[in-house]
Amino acid sequence: MSKAGEQVLVEPERYEFRALPMHQFALERRDFCKLLGAGLAVFAVAKDLSAKQETAPGPHGFHNEELPKEIGAWLHIGEDGMVTGFAGKAEIGQNVRTTLAQTIADELGVPIEDVRMILGDTALTPFDAGTFGSRSTPTITPQLRKVAAAARNLLLEKASKQWNVPGEKLVAGDGKITDPASGRSLQFAELAREDDVGHKTPGEEHIKPAPQWTIAGKPIPKVDARAFVTGNHRYSTDLRPEGLLYGKVLRPPSFGATLISYDDSAAKAMPDVVLVRDGDFVGAAAPTVSAAERALTALRLQWKEVPQISDKEIFTYLKKNALPSREDRFRQTKGSVAEGLASASKKLETTYTVAYIAHAPLEPRAAVAQWTEGKLTVWMGTQRPFAVRDDLADIFHVAEKNVRVIVPDTGSAYGGKHTSDAGLEAARLARAAAGRPVKLVWTREEEFTWAYFRPAGVIEVKSGIAADGKLTAWEFHNYHSGMSAIETPYEVANQYTKYHQVPLVLRSGSYRGLAATANHFARETQMDTLAQMASIDPLEFRLKNLSNARITAVLEAGAKAFGWPRQKSGESQGFGVAAGYEKGSYVATFAEISVDRKAGVVLVKKLVEAFECGAIVNPDGLRNQVVGAMIQGLGGALFEAIQFQNGRITNAHFSSYRVPRFRDVPEIEVILLDREDLPSAGAGETPIMAIAPAIGNAFYDATKVRLTSLPLQPERHLAG
Amino acid sequence: MAAGIELVINGKRYAVNFPPDTPLLYVLRDELGLTGTKYGCGEGMCGSCTVLIGGSARRSCQINVGAAASRPITTIEGLEKEGTLHPVQQAFLDAGAFQCAYCTSGMIMSSVSLLQSNPHPSAEQIFQALQGNICRCGSHPRIVEAVQQAAGKMQERAK
């Protein structure tokens, strides 16, 4: 393999975010026509979307990734009346296939059953930077609305000409244009047929505001749900193209190890095995997984290992190894913290730590790769099909147009499927397999070891309050874990916030909500302690220091549902609250816990969460995402932590890395605030971020013990 | 050594040639194309690969194909009868009890097994039966709701 390829495969520090390609891949129109047949095609490009993406730190620096200057969207109305929408997004369980179909059906005026979405296919869909950062709803939804509005207007124009009736007197809906005066109507399919595959670029289309939605805003079930309860849906891991070989990659014994001797004489003698050694990459492909494994076992290898940082020393290491930074984007300053602290009646300084955690998507990283006449096709569960395509093109020295990446609806990701690894590995093996497709499915142990983690971090907070409970000073340092939601939403005249980069220890990257969870944990725990120091109710203390009406609204809605302030029914009970906002959505979480000191058991009994993300596109799907984020958040809050020693992950199994299971799930209540007057924001991430501090604060309420590390592991802090 | 093994899966007979110590999961998925049964950990810790063997829920990654040969096997593909979903499948669909749905096959198979042995499970008994099945998306409350709905429907049908 090329040098560049080796770097990608062996360099554990590689971070998935990077500069975007300088140009866009455009679907060749003849491919498009071949795919869909005759009908009406509408194409849109938005030139002015400049929303910034949030990223986490990496070796190339901490940067805001720019969205491409042009994001396209396509829509096709076929002669059979079927409407096809195209978007480069990946369906990873967040229900984007349904919400995008709803959006098109709503704006165009067709039943949802007549809309199908083609997603995440680099040969068929417009360029897309990736499915992350809660960006699908705020960016692609308006795009598809514009394109659907353009299509609707085109159909109105055609009917208007045909009937010689002004367009504004006609109505589009239910798949047809109707003339209410005469009662006549024309199906979209009939109108589309007249046009011999033309295309129209939308101008400034008027799109329906949320109060006029008829299909969007409704609890439409997942569009292809039946395929999932019958086992018929094919994830990447399920694909079995003709002639398939199964791949296995030989992993080094520890991070940073290099191969110093290689003897494949025994393995080479095995029949039907394709062996590949390329730098430190060693893998095999064979007709069965076990045959590929046997071949790898027969290799005689020696590795040179290098000492690595272990979990015991990680926080000291992160603090000591922060890189000096002169860059302004890491820092926010307002007023003078020194003055604010000097004028404070009470001061509080706390250090918080956050462990590495794993995404552990139930479908492991996997890919199927096939080379045909110099062209490469890769099927892969990834959040970034276009980035994977670019990586493949770079590494194998083929033109981008000769690489196609297809994303079957994927068995979850949570920010964990940004990198190209499984696709590169499968493609490297397939390259040696004489045209036969190769499937590579990472084992659970590989998942827990060779993927990447939510970064660990150290957070230091200095704060002061006046006698009336108003914040006077706030200084906040985040080492390594990231900048998401690093700025306090509370009103403080004197602030200093800084993000400190640290070179990666374990390979780290995105995770649902990024550092918003870590930063909220530190901030909302600190706020809770300050409230206690001020002898003010924690909810009241927050409201007193807030002027952000949307946070106030979720706090008040959550408090009402939870019944805050609540009377304790016994010593063993504790109540906690935490709130905040990120990525345009707002959350307040209330927790009730019970503590059994004798048995050493801490139980989360109830969680109430109020959430607001602008106009709700699908309340049922949203509720599923919010509840899901809350349950996933329980793991990172209470017990999830990657353990590592000298370059090895020591709990790389579900038996030793605990994730939330049925018994961990408390009673959950979700209050969704629908703001039809506001644009829809993404909702997959923010609902996770206030869970940990709400539980930690409830633990304090029950025990007067303050927990400052994630995971909280509250049982370890029960005295006696 | 590879040996001829006869399996009865979803009422059909299959002759497979695999070493008897091969986990059933790989035979189902890679040899027979019954990919509705999922690989999640290969260690019996996540429940994604759950099938029914002789009517009871078993982790197909933990049972050898040789040991599975003597009893009838049901996979997710075998639940639907003549286009009609099993009540548990229908209940999962009605409750929207999934997000990425990768765990769904295993959840459904574990639930079918539970309802066969206990037609009226309490919430606690459902937790107990599904504790070995991981859902990373956090659809647990809806899954419990789906199992309860299915129990109700199956009870009605039995009357």
Image (tube, coloured by chain):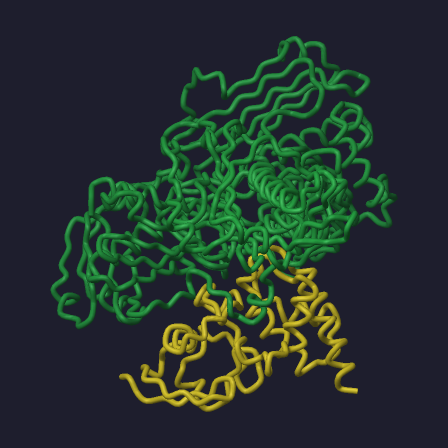
Chain colours: A green, B yellow
Residue appearing at x 75%, y 42% in the figure: A212
Residue appearing at x 61%, y 25% in the figure: A487
Residue appearing at x 14%, y 61% in the figure: A264
- State which quadrant residue A563 falls in: top right
Q: Position of residue A148 (x, y in %)?
A: 60, 43
A114 vs A696: above or below: below
Q: How many marks?
A: 0
Relative depth, front residue between A574 and A510: A510
Relative depth, front residue between A527 and A580: A580
- Residue A53 horizontal side relative to residue A176, left or right: left
Q: Position of residue A107 (x, y in %)?
A: 65, 44
Query: Farthest residue toward the front?
Result: A164
Q: Position of residue B138 (x, y in %)?
A: 62, 55
- Residue A672 horizontal side relative to residue A234, left or right: right
B150 vs A362: above or below: below
Q: Is residue A412 visible?
A: yes
Q: Is residue A704 visible?
A: no
Residue appearing at x 51%, y 48% in the figure: A195
- State which quadrant residue A565 falls in: top right
Query: Farthest residue toward the left?
Result: A265
Relative depth, front residue between A288 and B85: B85
A577 vs B121: above or below: above
Q: Position of residue A377 (x, y in %)?
A: 32, 54
- Residue A548 horizontal side relative to residue A102, left or right: right
